[in-house]
Image (cartoon, rainbow, N blue to C red):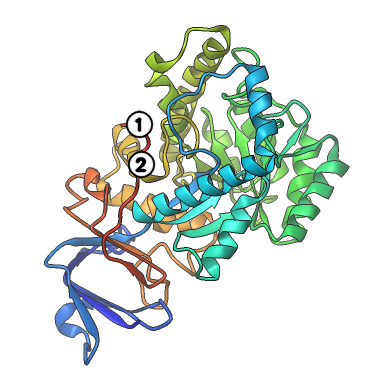
Amino acid sequence: MKRAYINANIITGDASDEVIRDGCIIVNGLGKLAFVGRTNEAALGQLETIDLKGRYVMPGLINAHIHMFTQGGPVKNMDSKQAAKFMKFLKTRIGQRVMKKLYAYNTSAFINAGVTTVRDVGSFMNYDLMMKELIEKGEVVGPRIICSGGIITPTGGHGCEMPGTVVCDGPIEFAKAVRHHYHLKTDWIKICNTGGVSDAKYVGEAGMPHMTFEEIQAACTEAHKRNMMVASHCESTEGIIDALRAGVDTIEHGADFDEEIAEMFKNNRKALRGYTSLIPTLAAAGGLVNNKEKFIDNEGNRIVLGNAERISQGCIDGFQKALKYGVKLGMGTDVSVPNVTAYNTYQELLLYKDNSDLTNLEIIELATKANAEVLDIDHLTGCLKVDLDADFIVLKGNPLKDLNNIKDPVHVVTRGYFIEKPTYKTVEGVD
């Protein structure tokens, strides 16, 4: 439906733009932005109008690193046998119904919290593709989903025991897995070239290289032939170097690096677009470290916490070095890890504030316009500009003064669809 939103303070998502005071946004019948400017300059005609009464409007948030296979609740203390039993359960019919409900919950929580685009970088049994299809058919209201399908990882690699993960060894198997994902019509490829926190077997395994350079390169080469980009879970400096040399397009999580490595990010001839971006996910390991009192004191959890403490600082170091050296940054939270939910995406912006000298406007750009550029969807969304999709949120207060005002938007518009009273169910035990 064609509609005009009037009397707003509009933040376009581009930090170089001034806030449009007494602004108006007109959405056409295709869910596109037909006008963004001052209310008194808009041709309203017989359009339905919604008076925003001076509230602030900004582009919908983009979360570039999510999973939807849990709600992101507090740590569940399972040993390896319990975890294996749980994973086996998820492959049953009842388990599959549970998964569908979890994906449906997260889809709803994202959009009602003002997240209008997500990139799923590792799903269970390709449920991200299922949810994307339902949303695009109009059967479900949800964010734009950029899909990676199941993680591609080596034997013993991070995520190798998750249902739907594709386990490979050697360049030929990795190339074949990419071809299979292309056949499934995933948008991205997700690999894990280092160990991770959640399934490490000893303190220090998170960040240890798990893939050979040749394996990473094979995945990148096959993906790039098909105009697909590759995201890699990577939590060490050594792993970053291997991934950059092989042509990975985004480094997920990250670690400390120097100016020489920064140049590899910025001028990466093997990456599809000639550069590699960093998605720091400060909330991910930090969510574990900051809630360690909820852990049961056993060997498994001591390993998780020991790795989380190391990786959390590495993510912060990498974020700060990216700012220092001009590496392209995006924003993602790693939804589904403990204490990181679909609806608290805004907290990553607060962490960016705490760990940098960025202005609120610059942080908003990272979560919107810059993120759209990283994901190669800036021709669709990320900014409030004419001809882009109408993805925006109406806020209760001024986010340029306090980023907490991004929490719980008053209204959400996703590709033109108006959610008048967004609401979601919170997860017990998460602040």
Looking at the image, the residue that sits furthest to the left is 53
Q: Which residue is mark 1?
A: 430
Q: Is residue 238 left or right of residue 337?
A: right
Give the distance between the C-alpha atoms of the residues marked 1 and 2, in whole angstroms: 10 Å
162 vs 373: above or below = above
Instruction: Using the rendered image of the protein, determine whether residue 230 is visible from the camera's viewpoint.
Output: yes
Q: Camera-side residue: 216 or 413?
A: 413
For image coordinates 65% across by 15% down, the residue present is 201
Contact, CB < 8 Å: mark 1 with mark 2? yes
**Amino acid at circle 2:** Asn
257 vs 53: above or below = above
Q: Percent x, y for residue 355?
A: 33, 32
Judged by depth in the image, the label closer to the viewer, 1 or 2, is: 1
Instruction: Give the image quarter of residue 212.
Output: top right
Q: Percent x, y for residue 323?
A: 41, 40
Q: Which residue is mark 2?
A: 344
Q: Is residue 326 left or right of residue 218?
A: left
Q: Is residue 375 left or right of residue 109?
A: right
128 vs 379: above or below = above
